[in-house]
Image (spheres, rainbow, N blue to C red):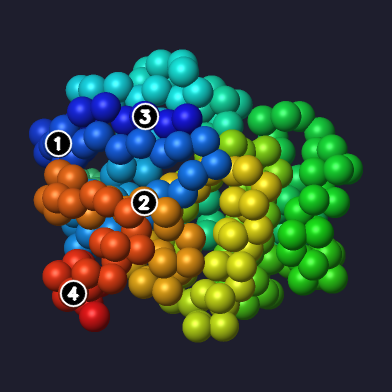
Amino acid sequence: MLSIENLAAGYDRLEVLHDISIKVEEAGSVVVLGPNGAGKSTLCRAISGLLPCRHGKIVFDGKDMTGASPADRVRAGIVQVPEGRQVFPDMTVLENLRLGSWIHGEPKGPDLQKAFDLFPRLAERRNQNAGLMSGGEQQLLALARAMMARPSLLLLDEPTQGLSPVAIEQVATALISIRAQGVSILLVEQNLSLAEAVGERAYVLETGRCALEGPAAELLSSDAVAASYLGH
Ligand SMILES: Nc1ncnc2c1ncn2[C@@H]1O[C@H](COP(=O)(O)OP(=O)(O)OP(=O)(O)O)[C@@H](O)[C@H]1O
């Protein structure tokens, strides 16, 4: 489904990612770990097209997307849940959700219904301003908004940042349900419980290179990875 081959990307004269190769299988899930500054957010930006690829290739569903615009990538099914949630605080839950389907024109009733089925709390609060919700609820809204774009691959950049353990569990439950619907996931995450709950394969980035990769259960339970990259 997604194949990143020998990717290099960066900012101005700074090359952050060097020779990164990552695969996400159809309906698969990949978790990307690494210390601060390793290049995890940069990787998300390069996949979603916010940052150009300097070298290498991004192939999605058999199509070369290396030079495609962010909008074309969303249209193809690559949808990112932005870091820091970025819901529109002065708009209602419903208005935020409607914005999620901009790429398909008018939001379709079944898409909204699916979002509300997945996140019943949002249905209860559909007319509430997003800014009045808790951090955890805003994260669920950011996830639901991304689902309105009908992704086949969901990119998530540290969705649990600043959330309580209860809210982290809700995000994990939501991601497990989303995967069960056949959506692939690429998750950048430092929280071990979420990484374990969602990840099938794991990659560890270190100073812009892939330092380790393997089955998530194996890699995440290794003492060396926990001590070096997860702060446990
Ligand atoms: N907009 C930018 N302009 C210039 N340099 C940047 C920019 N964004 C990130 N960088 C640099 O790129 C490197 C990788 O940053 P990135 O945010 O991708 O790391 P990260 O692994 O996501 O870190 P964190 O876990 O702290 O979010 C860092 O050295 C950072 O200073």
Give the mark, 2 or 1, whose residue is nearer the N terminus.
1
Looking at the rendered structure, the secondary structure element under dot 3 is strand
- Mark yes or no: residue 96 visible: yes
Question: Disc 2, disc 1: CB below 8 Å?
Answer: no
Q: Nearer the viewer, mark 3 or mark 2?
A: 2
Q: In the figure, is residue 25 to the left or right of 18?
A: right
Could you give the CA–CA distance between mark 3 and mark 4, rounded to whole angstroms? 29 Å
Give the mark, 2 or 4, whose residue is nearer the N terminus.
2
Residue 68 at what x, y percent from top left?
44, 20
Front-most of residues 230 and 90 = 230
Q: In the figure, is residue 3 to the left or right of 140?
A: left
Amino acid type, mark 2:
Arg
The residue at which mark 4 appears reads as: 223
Q: Is residue 72 above or below residue 80?
A: above
Q: Which mark is residue 201?
A: 2
Quadrant assignment, res 27: top right
Could you give the CA–CA distance between mark 2 and mark 4, rounded to whole angstroms? 17 Å
The residue at which mark 3 appears reads as: 3
Amino acid type, mark 4:
Asp
Q: Is residue 61 above or below residue 100?
A: above
The residue at which mark 1 appears reads as: 18
Could you give the CA–CA distance between mark 3 and mark 2, rounded to whole angstroms? 14 Å
Give the mark, 1 or 3, whose residue is nearer the N terminus.
3
Quadrant assignment, res 227: bottom left
